[in-house]
Image: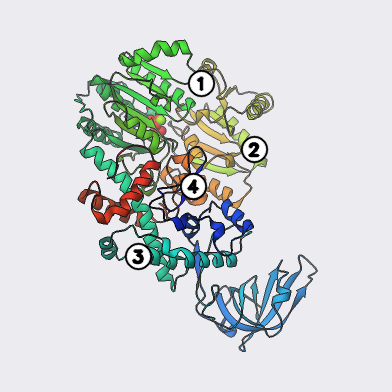
Amino acid sequence: MSVNILRSATGADGTRIVVNENNYAKGLATPVRYVKGVGERRAEQLARLDIHTVGDLLYTLPRRYEDRTQFTRISQLQSGDFATISCAVKACDWVKSRYGKPYFEAMVSDGSGIAHCRWYNAHYLKEQLKVETALVIFGKVSKSRGRISFQHPDFEVGEKGDEESLHMGRVVPIYALTENLQQRSARRIMWNAVNAFIGEVREILPESLLDRLGLLPAQEALSTVHFPETLARARAARYRLVFEEFLCVQLVLVARKIHSEQVLVGTAHNIVGRLKDSFVDSLPFELTGAQKRVIEEIENDMRKPRPMHRLLQGDVGSGKTVVAASALLDAIECECQGTVMTPTEILARQHYVSFKEYLEPLGLRVLLLTSDLSAARRKEVLPRIKDGWYHLVVGTHALIEDRVQFKKLGLAVIDEQHKFGVEQRGELYGKAHNPDVLVMTATPIPRTLAMTLYGDLDVSIVDEMPTGRKETVTRVIKEDQLPDAYGFIRKQVAKGRQAYIVYPLVSESDKLELKSAEEMFRHLRGEVFHDESVGLLHGQMPSGEKAAVMDLFKNGELDILVATTVIEVGVDVPNATVMLIENAERFGLAQLHQLRGRIGRGAHKSFCVLQGSPTTLDSWKRLKVMEKTTDGFVIAEEDMKIRGMGNLLGREQSGFPALRVGDPLGDSDILLDARREAFTIVESDPKMTKPEFEGLRSRARALYKLVGPFVRVG
Ligand code: ADP
Ligand code: MG
């Protein structure tokens, strides 16, 4: 799935659809196997890379380039250089080394010196390379004791600097591909595709825009990005393509935003703040400056006669729940109802507990609505939502089902966790009276990514942590250091503190995994912690039992809580100062950060111990990030850099089509340019009816079909 409409897309039912056919030139929808050089087998390889059509192929941009325009004399080569040499083979043969694999070696010369080239697993070379064969070679130079060598360099047979050459004597594209598809074949296929199909690429940007911003025309950009004359030209070409992609996304989001500001009619809440004030007064702490500021931003917005669409960002523990509760109280004060929606049932339960604690003392009625509610109970409560008896309803997005009707929904708080997509948001906006919507993220999102996912929303950031919190020190350890970690926990407990030991379950409903957590609990209680009291908490326990265990831990009757990720959100025990997370490599960084947010909440210094058995360098690097920082925004950014945007912008994750060519983190400058331009366009021509916007409008329209009903562009 992709924002770039030149791509095919997979529909919700799994069938492949070609997006917006009239705009999608027929040629680009051609199956990729019709490209010269792509047979059955290659087509299968490409399909695994999610490349099905010619359009998919052409919009697979090079990951980087190598400048092979300049030849270097062998005598001038420096160790570590990437260099191109033009030379002839002087001797070559297979070498069976005493250690390791046999390899093919060629000794080459250009008259100024000699270099040795080695290739492993290259049986075809015996046929291709003979004494006196002319060669152009590109690769990384290594020089040791005066001997110059290349390991597995790229090469091309023929006269030097052959003009037609795809692989040498030019700026050469390098694609991010699997092992099976060689760069040389990929380049050849791409060359054929560009030559045969570039004429099918349509220009959708207005000429005035191209002129004003100095952008390359569409066809030129796409052929240049694959086969540029210079690196500077490659950059300009890529800029144009990424800009176009971001612009289409931003047009949809900006159009939504402006539409909701100028056209939609919502409720103007006449907030006095009576309920909110008594709530805030009842809290055992002062609100932070950031909380006060954000509450005011929200109230100002809720007073307006248009629906609020706002994103509430803040690091774990910054106190977003208090802010959300205040806003809900403001809505309730104005004779409206509120709702809190979460992506999972567990989260719904946790929020229910927190909000009940905040609201019930004020005489308000809170309902938890989940899918496991009995039919009888459901029949009983639905009318009570409709007649306004319940002030607040907490539940999963089952809440947006049609049969759940409110008397008057004033504010919907959506706890997003990246899982609540643009589409579901759209459905909610359709609910009666255009309620105000506050989207709350559980983990911070870097600014430019937020613009891509939530660019239709205003943003409030709680950018200050409550005072009096002590720092949390984090250490990554290996499995054999676990006994030390247990010893450390004992010492902390002896000082009166409490500890969490978190066990990774991929899924809370997995019976087998649950069993291993239970076994671990018995092992810890029976054999490791003799003098400490140990409890167990997991998602499968009946809620009464769960609550009982939590109470014991809160009251200090349990020293150690062995738990699954159910404690990720909402659990709040300031006296708990240690968290040991076993097999931490199985969690994402954002989740680790969220878990770690359960400690460091009191007046004592806290310690997070991550036991990992990472199998790759990347997963080790990820864990080490946790040692370096406790700033959720930094962690989110690192996580995305390491895991790649693809995973985070995947459709199931975010509800938003994945980007094909742009990366909101790496290309943040282009994103900002595109967003600015989107505002200029929508403000000058809100429905984009000018003929010059025809191409952009139909692309944005196709995109908007993908992200659900909200506002019609045009
Ligand atoms: P978030 O949802 O942003 O992770 P919460 O709203 O759950 O954070 O708050 C985390 C903890 O901090 C809760 O125990 C809450 O009572 C407490 N808290 C919230 N605001 C403040 C504040 N201004 N001062 C001290 N503690 C606060
Ligand atoms: Mg919270």
Along the polypeptide, which appears first: circle 2 or circle 3? 3
- Name the spot of residue 456 as percent of width and height, x first: 31, 42
Q: Residue at x 33, y 57 (%)?
A: 204
Residue named by callout 1: 550
Mark 4 falls on what kind of element? Answer: helix
Along the polypeptide, which appears first: circle 1 or circle 4? 1
Along the polypeptide, which appears first: circle 3 or circle 4? 3
Q: Amino acid at mark 3?
A: Pro
Q: Disc 3 or disc 1, which is closer to the eye? A: 3
Between 450 and 211, the residue placed more toward the observer is: 211
Q: Disc 1 versus disc 4: distance between alpha carbons?
A: 31 Å
Q: Amino acid at mark 2?
A: Leu
Q: Disc 1 or disc 4, which is closer to the eye? A: 4
Q: Specify few, some or many for label 1: CA neighbours under 10 Å numbering under 14, 14-19, or 20 or more.
A: many
Mark 3 falls on what kind of element? Answer: loop
Q: Amino acid at mark 1?
A: Met
Left or right of 103? Residue 392 is left
Q: Specify few, some or many for label 4: CA neighbours under 10 Å numbering under 14, 14-19, or 20 or more.
A: many
Q: Disc 3 versus disc 1: distance between alpha carbons?
A: 62 Å
Residue named by callout 4: 639
Q: How is the image coloured?
A: rainbow
User: In the picture, residue 218 is in which quadrant?
Assistant: bottom left
Along the polypeptide, which appears first: circle 4 or circle 2? 2
Q: Disc 1 or disc 2, which is closer to the eye? A: 1
Along the polypeptide, which appears first: circle 1 or circle 2? 2
Residue named by callout 3: 217
Say above or below: 91 vs 201: below
Left or right of 706? Residue 391 is left
